[in-house]
Amino acid sequence: MSIEIVIRGTTGATVVDFHGRLDLHSRWHVKAIMNQCCFTETEHLILNLQGLLFVDSAGLGFLVMCSRKYKDLNRRITWVYAPGFVGDLIEQLQLHELIPLCQSEQEALSSLSS
């Protein structure tokens, strides 16, 4: 299974839903979408990782790089925690210290008012 990405707008944010595998081969597809988001979303970008079944070092590194780039544009980005293997990896690498991480999309949206 490759990656499927759905972009949807919600009040005050754009949500990018990831489903499937984010690896070396699928990151080029993700790169095009993330570049588009950098040009179109000026407030808050939420990367919903709940549908990711697998991520390798290239995919995870790419997500971190995109998040840093987005922050460098003085924009807000949040990741929604992924269950299972992907979530365990994010925890072990302590990525919450680099990128805001929420347990749900609703939590990410409610953090807008904080």
Image (cartoon, rainbow, N blue to C red):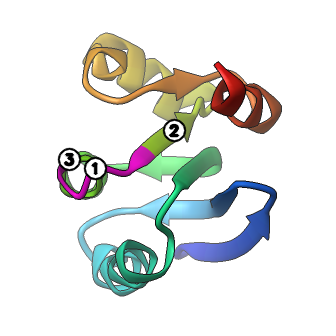
Residue contact between numbered discs 3 and 2, judged by CB atoms under 8 Å: no
Residue contact between numbered discs 1 and 3, judged by CB atoms under 8 Å: no
Amino acid beneath label 3: Arg
Number of numbered labels in the structure image: 3
Residue positioned 61% across, 24% down in the render: 102
Q: Which residue is mark 2?
A: 79
> Quick one: label 1 or label 2, which is nearer the N terminus?
1
Checking the image for residue 68, the label placed there is 3
Q: Which residue is mark 1?
A: 74
State the image coordinates of residue 47 (x, y, percent, origin top left): 54, 51
66 to 104, vertically: above or below:
below
- Per the rendered image, the range of residues in magenta is 72-76
Say whether residue 102 is left or right of residue 54: right
Amino acid beneath label 2: Trp
Checking the image for residue 84, the label placed there is none
Camera-near label (1 vs 3) is 1
Nearer to me, 110 or 5: 110
Magenta highlight on residue 74: yes
Amino acid beneath label 1: Asn
Magenta highlight on residue 104: no
Residue positioned 52% across, 76% down in the render: 2
Residue positioned 70% across, 27% down in the render: 113
Secondary structure, mark 3, is helix
State the image coordinates of residue 59 (x, y, percent, origin top left): 29, 57
